[in-house]
Image: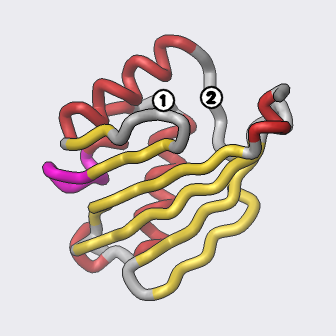
């Protein structure tokens, strides 16, 4: 299935695969040029190039793994509940337009990150 016809769930599954291989370029390619990635507790990151740079910096700083626990979709939205091998937990909301991410917001369970 081509990218424009990909369902929100398919896009998020591709996102998880790229995230787990620490591929900032593949991740950035899943976003629209003017997309916004807003991880709570941080300022929003706007634009595909800035999103690529954000992921590159994060992957350089630490090893991260996303283990999906639940993946739901409703219309143009997908919701991913995740954990990592260390027991940290969170969720992400993805607005998918024409097979790419237009907006993403992520929340973390602060207590699972050690307070």
**Badge 1 is on which residue?**
22
Which of discs 2 and 1 lies nearer the camera? The answer is 2
Q: Measured along the vertical axis of the image, is residue 101 above or below residue 33?
A: below
Q: Secondary structure at mark 2?
A: loop
Residue at image coords 76%, 38%: 110
Q: Main secondary structure of the magenta part?
A: strand
Q: Is residue 30 magenta?
A: yes
Q: Position of residue 71 (x, y in %)?
A: 63, 69
Magenta stretch in the rendered image: 29-35
In the depicted view, which residue is nearer to us: 27 or 81?
81
Determine whether label 2 and label 1 are within 8 Å by CB. Answer: yes
Q: Secondary structure at mark 1?
A: loop
Question: In which image quadrant can residue 88 be found?
Answer: top right
Residue at image coords 34%, 74%: 6
Position of residue 26 in the picture relative to residue 41 (left or right) = left
Q: Residues within 10 Å of mark 2 (few under 14, many from 20)?
A: some
Inter-mark Cα distance, 2 to 1:
8 Å
Q: Position of residue 64 (x, y in %)?
A: 62, 28
**Badge 2 is on which residue?**
64
Q: Residues within 10 Å of mark 1 (few under 14, many from 20)?
A: many
């Amino acid at each position: 299935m081509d990218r424009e016809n990909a369902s929100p769930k398919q896009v998020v599954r591709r996102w998880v695969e790229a995230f787990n291989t620490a591929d900032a370029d593949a991740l950035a390619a899943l976003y629209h040029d003017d997309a916004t990635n807003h991880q709570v507790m941080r300022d929003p990151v706007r634009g595909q190039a800035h999103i690529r740079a954000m992921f590159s910096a994060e992957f350089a700083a630490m090893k991260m793994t996303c283990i999906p626990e639940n993946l739901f979709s409703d219309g143009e939205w997908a919701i991913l509940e995740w954990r990592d091998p260390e027991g940290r937990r969170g969720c992400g909301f993805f607005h998918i337009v024409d097979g790419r991410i237009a907006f993403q917001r992520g929340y973390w369970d602060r207590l699972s990150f050690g307070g």
